[in-house]
Image (cartoon, grey):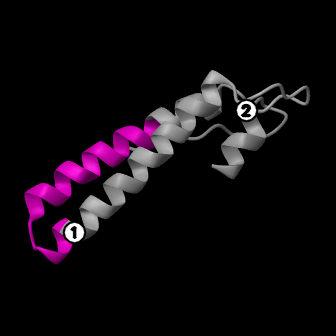
Amino acid sequence: VLFATAMLTSPNYSGPSREMLVSRFYVNEVFYAIREIRAAIEARDASKALAAWDFGKDSWNSYFQILNRSIVEKVGDKFVEIV
């Protein structure tokens, strides 16, 4: 979240941008997926763990898409999608 805030906040900060709010939403989804994966592993439920992984993977990829818009070649490489 701190990285996204640094990448998506303007020096002329006038409040959270829509992109920042959406990126925080995706981070919250990733946190939820991690908790679901842990619960599924503890319950030894492989299908639930895989479903939570797919959900979390999609959330990470959406988060990366938002951040990649702010990364220019001068800064470094863009995030690669998780497959």
Which residue sits at x=26%, y=45%? Answer: 54
Q: Give residue 11's position: percent from left, percent from top.
A: 90, 30
Provide the residue designation for mark 1.
Answer: 39
Q: Give residue 40's position: percent from left, percent from top.
A: 17, 66
Which amino acid type is shown beneath numbered disc 1? Ala
Which residue sits at x=55%, y=40%? Answer: 24
Q: Quadrant of residue 46?
A: bottom left
Residue interval drawn in magenta? 40-61
Provide the residue designation for mark 2.
Answer: 8
**Residue 56 shown left or right of residue 14 in the figure:** left
Tell me the CA gap for discs 1 and 2. Answer: 33 Å
Q: State the count of labels.
A: 2
* Labelled pair 1, 2 in contact (Cβ < 8 Å): no
Marks 1 and 2, the one that precedes in the sequence: 2
Look at the magenta stretch and give its main secondary structure: helix
Q: From this viewpoint, which residue is outermost toward the bottom? A: 42
**Residue 38 shown left or right of residue 73 in the figure:** left
Q: Nearer the viewer, residue 24 or 63?
A: 24
SS for callout 2: helix
Magenta-colored stretch includes residue 28: no
